[in-house]
Amino acid sequence: MQYIPLDPSKTEIRLIKLHPRPANTSTQRDLTPRCDLIHVSLDDKPDYAALSYTWGDPRDTEMITVGLSSVPVTQNLVIWIDALCINQGDNEEKSWQVQLMREIYQRASFVTIWLGPADDTSDEVMDFLRQLGTRAMRFGLDGGPGHIRTVNAQWRSLASKPPSLRDMSRQRVTIIDENGTEPDKHFIMGDLNELYYSISGSHGQDCLFPVEGMADLFERPWWGRTWVLQEISLAQKAGFACGTRRLSRRCCTAALNAFKALAYVFQEMTILEGAIFTSTSYQRSVAMAGFDWLPTLQLAMWDTQRYNPYPLLALLRATCLTAFRPPIISVLGLEASDPRDKIYGLLGLAADRDQLKGFGVQPDYSKSCQEVYIAVTSSMLRQGHVSVLSLNSFPKTQIGLPSWVPDWSRPLEISLQGTGIDHMTLEPEYKASGSLLPRSPLFNRVGGTTSVSVSGFIYDELHDIGATWAEFYLLQNTIFDTLVAAKKLLAELVRLSILRGEVYKTLKERICGAARTVTAEIGYDETGRWARIGNRRYDTAASLLTIQVNDDPDETRLLSSELHALIMSDEVQTAFAPLDAAKFCGEIDAKARGRKPFVTKKGHLGLGPDHVKPGDAVAVLIGCQVPFVLRKSVGGSYQIVGEAYVDGIMDGEAVAGREIVGVLELI
């Protein structure tokens, strides 16, 4: 098909004018959808609707007649915009049209989100979500996370009471809109409680979530694409279509938030009460469901865009990270067929898009993926976001990226720290570089790539590497297997600490160091939230080390007698609580998975990326909360191996009293 060029000076776009099907459809040509492409200027505020959908298999197409031309389109494309309204073969046009996507979707009178044709369960699920969502909207569950927390707290209190006891309080509750733009919600507490009783699985079976069917619906391809995040977030009005069923965006949001609030209840009950909380198979399926991550991200972004839009770094963290939610590790990455679109598909949402444009970051399909990713990371470092360096992981699928540039095309590894709801605030907080402030980064073109010089210094060097959690965690048939794996990893860290005795002088200090290191000193606090836990796992770690295993090496058996004497003198409970041990094992799995234990020449225990090796350097980069493992390269420069937990220097100990901080060149 021959496209007539658009005029950028007039902010022109193409719109599709569909023709009605002829009354007599006797031929295949009559059955073929017919339309014309018309040019309009956004400056004229045209009235149009938009479609959000997933491009199908390019080999599986049907024909549509545009003007006098027949054009193949993918079969799942019933109504569309970008596939034909943008000349996909013209990179120059595509570059500037993509820059208009924000305005295009904002100005659409309505955006229909096409999830695809119906299947065996989708009609039932769509009907359930519409009915439940309508009820849940009364309690503000179509709003922000504050509403979810309020509902979750109330439902958590109900879950701790006997099922026979129903609280039908007539207390009047007001939920104040967090952004001050929506009317406050007023409801009777007993009505909110009744919603919980109907879906909890402990009080009745008439309104249970169709978990398997919801998984099928929310795991459809639409939810996992980068571009659709912009399309659903910017639309003033939007709704979902699946087969013949329809569901509003607000109703879907409320229903999914009710599901999340219930899942949080069951997860918290399991973590905090363990065996005391006897869950049903339905409750376990709700607690362990992993399908809600991406839908929640997509649906919540609408409110985020209206009130507190994210900068690009936050958007990339939200859409590229692998997420850990016990007992599930989920790949939380939006996909794009063109890796450059992992950036371009988010720029329209970024709060800092104008600043990034000043740095040269804007859609330009004449640039390679390597150039785009280097430009984006350079811009973030110029903005002061040194923490972006923690997002580097290996292997990188994009060829030619420097070690300091994250590969945004793939799901990133789980970082040591999580983030707050803004996807920018790192939690829990470390302070490896203290209160020192970094200098502006300096960039240098080296051969075909770019290096960056940042404030920092080499503090130590890796002396030896230990066996990993994965090597000990081969068998997971019983809880005992998991406890044995934890015991072996702790013993491995104690062994490493003995190799260099400068930091840990006594057995108790070694066990404390091992217990901190094995979880990067992060675990559940009394409320079930992730926090810095210091030495609170010492008793459990010491007790785990007393487990007798036939294949223990000689040095571990020699440790046992000394350990028992220590336990007796410290009055540690040798008969550890199973719940405490299971919780500790979950914390170990969250941080030790994919990481390798080590000891440095100065004697610090540590946990670093899986590909660290002896001789690698431990560096403190100013402005970063965590240390890094670097690998020496030619000419005195370094490659980033990855972030690390280094016991004993996570709170500024390495920079204490240091007046001079050098510069490290990263390639």
Image (cartoon, helix red, strand yellow):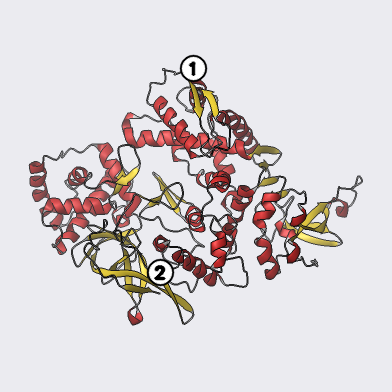
**Which labelled disc corresponds to residue 170?**
1
Q: Is residue 25 left or right of residue 649?
A: right
Percent x, y of residue 555? 13, 57
Q: Residue at x 54, y 25 (%)?
A: 186
Residue farthest to the right? Answer: 24
- Foreground pick, 575 / 520: 520
Percent x, y of residue 170? 49, 17
Q: Residue at x 61, y 35 (%)?
A: 251
- Foreground pick, 43 / 3: 43
Mark 1 or mark 2, which is nearer the start of the sequence? 1
**Which labelled disc corresponds to residue 629?**
none
- Asked if residue 17 can be seen in this view, the reply is yes
Residue under pointer 2: 440
Percent x, y of residue 638? 35, 74
Percent x, y of residue 470? 32, 56
- Foreground pick, 327 / 615: 615
Q: Quadrant for residue 349, please give it.
A: bottom right
